């Protein structure tokens, strides 16, 4: 069904809804005010620039790089039967794919921008990486057709499992068990052998209500997701931003194909709509914080009274330190004088006998500050000054 419309529309056939069958034609349509609801359909191609491999690309795809997990076949990592027997390979892979390891792309932020403008009817995604959520698309606007890491539950009793605990297990590559029945727990990603989420079937006819359909970074090779673009009405423009033509798109009079990189394509569309600066601003909010900024947001603002109290404490400490220093200086001088007086026949210098002045460095004296020599005399005494003169 995903490829049922295989013949490309003849160039001589005029569009029904758009002025032009081009990107600028789509932008004009959006800016006309006639577009109030947009459905977006996405695949792994919108996440590859974030560093997440797609599944099926030769040599670089996810399945092509799973040999290190010693699987009987690559797809076994997402096979529910294999998972029940050996969950370790999945949890090894999950550590790499888990949300938080990758920044959303500008394409994810484009979908967020559509939501902020009140234009997003629904996002249908095949991706499990949750980058749409991290970019700011709200939960009620997303249909994760193949599930995702957003939630997790027991595969036996279906009891939900705490977010913080699954994160700890994935970080440690250990296997979580259900608190209720000790069954295996896994993120609610749709494995081979499992049914798609009910939310997909509840919303699969929504494309028929949309004024515009945007398909991004998908091969449209997996059913029933591949059938979604065909659910749009005749006369509803469909725009494909993808590396290649897929799914029969291009066969209708209002289909527009932008073949190439998704990030480039959405930036071109945003610029044509006059949204490029807004898009870049939305994407900038997803940037990781600099090390110098970490923790700043968590520090509460201090009241005037608290700031005043801090200043008083600071002044009090400075006064105390000043008084202690004066007392120490007085004792130091007194000790030196006492030492001089006892340098008489039958007397012994306190310094020579190991007497310690207050605050004295246990590894030595404070001659670097007051210039006392080991015998207790000052190197800056009048006699020495006279000699230097």
Image: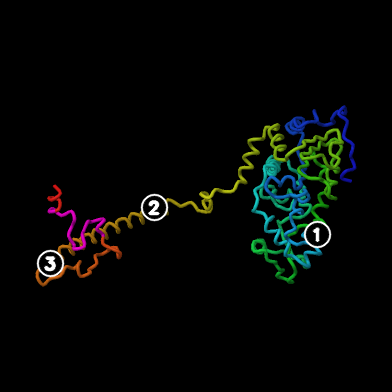
Q: Nearer the viewer, residue 259 or 311?
A: 259
Residue 282 location, x and y as percent?
Answer: 63, 42
Q: Nearer the viewer, residue 114 or 147?
A: 147
How many residues crowd around disc 2 within 10 Å: few (fewer than 14), some, or many (20 or more)?
few
Q: Give the labeled residue for mark 2.
A: 308
Check the image and report above or below for 306 versus 29: below
Check the image and report above or below for 227 versus 381: above
Residue 161 falls in image quadrant? bottom right
Magenta part mainly helix, strand or loop? Answer: loop
Q: From mark 3 to mark 2, how far is it between C-alphas?
A: 53 Å
How many residues crowd around disc 1 within 10 Å: few (fewer than 14), some, or many (20 or more)?
few
Q: From mark 2 to mark 1, how far is it between C-alphas?
A: 68 Å
Q: Do tag 2 and tag 1 residues touch (Cβ < 8 Å)?
A: no
Check residue 343 in the rendering and tell me which mark sits there, or answer none.
3
Q: Give the labeled residue for mark 1.
A: 73
Residue 364 location, x and y as percent?
Answer: 28, 63
Residue 157 falls in image quadrant? bottom right
Q: For the point 86% across and 33% down, which residue is it?
A: 253
Residue 26 location, x and y as percent?
Answer: 76, 33
Point out the stretch of residues depicted in magenta. 366-383
Q: Do tag 3 and tag 2 residues touch (Cβ < 8 Å)?
A: no
Check residue 317 in the rendering and tell me which mark sits there, or answer none.
none
Q: For the point 86% across and 42% down, which residue is it?
A: 230
Q: Earlier in the sequence, mark 3 or mark 1?
A: 1
**Which residue reaches farthest top?**
12
Residue 288 location, x and y as percent?
Answer: 59, 48
Q: From mark 3 to mark 1, how far is it between C-alphas?
A: 94 Å
Q: Is residue 382 magenta?
A: yes
Q: Earlier in the sequence, mark 2 or mark 1?
A: 1
How many residues crowd around disc 3 within 10 Å: few (fewer than 14), some, or many (20 or more)?
few
Q: Which-is-in-front pick, marks 3 and 2?
A: 3
Q: Is residue 222 magenta?
A: no
């Amino acid at each position: 069904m995903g490829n049922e419309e295989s013949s490309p529309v003849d160039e001589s056939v005029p569009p029904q809804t758009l002025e032009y069958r081009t990107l600028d034609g789509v932008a004009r349509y959006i800016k006309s005010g006639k577009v109030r609801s947009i459905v977006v359909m996405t695949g792994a191609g919108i996440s590859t620039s974030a560093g997440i491999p797609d599944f099926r690309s030769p040599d670089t795809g996810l399945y092509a790089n799973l040999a290190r997990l010693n699987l009987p076949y690559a797809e076994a990592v997402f096979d529910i039967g294999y998972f029940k027997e050996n969950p370790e390979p999945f949890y090894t892979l999950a550590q790499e794919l888990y949300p938080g390891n990758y920044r959303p792309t500008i394409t994810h932020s484009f979908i967020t921008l559509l939501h902020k403008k009140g234009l997003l009817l629904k996002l249908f995604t095949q991706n499990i990486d949750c980058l749409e959520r991290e970019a700011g698309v709200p939960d009620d606007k997303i249909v994760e057709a193949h599930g995702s890491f957003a939630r997790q539950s027991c595969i036996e009793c279906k009891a939900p499992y705490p977010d913080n605990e699954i994160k700890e297990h994935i970080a440690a590559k250990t296997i979580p068990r259900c608190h209720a029945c000790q069954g295996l727990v896994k993120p609610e990603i749709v494995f081979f052998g499992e049914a798609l989420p009910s939310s997909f079937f509840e919303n699969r006819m929504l494309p028929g209500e949309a004024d515009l359909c945007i398909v991004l970074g998908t091969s449209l090779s997996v059913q029933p997701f591949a059938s979604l673009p065909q659910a749009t009405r005749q006369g509803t423009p469909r725009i494909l931003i993808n590396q290649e033509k897929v799914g029969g798109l291009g066969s209708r009079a209002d289909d527009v194909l932008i073949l190439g990189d998704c990030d480039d394509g959405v930036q071109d569309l945003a610029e044509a709509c006059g949204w490029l600066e807004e898009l870049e601003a939305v994407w900038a909010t997803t940037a990781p914080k600099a090390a110098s900024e970490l923790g700043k947001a968590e520090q509460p603002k201090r009241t005037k009274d608290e700031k005043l109290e801090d200043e008083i404490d600071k002044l009090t400490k400075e006064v105390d330190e000043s008084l202690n220093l004066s007392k120490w200086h007085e004792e130091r001088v007194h000790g030196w004088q006492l030492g001089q007086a006892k340098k008489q026949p039958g007397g012994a210098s306190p310094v020579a006998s190991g007497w310690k002045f207050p605050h004295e460095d246990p590894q030595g004296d404070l001659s670097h500050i007051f210039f006392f020599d080991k015998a207790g005399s000052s190197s800056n005494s009048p006699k020495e000054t006279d000699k230097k003169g």
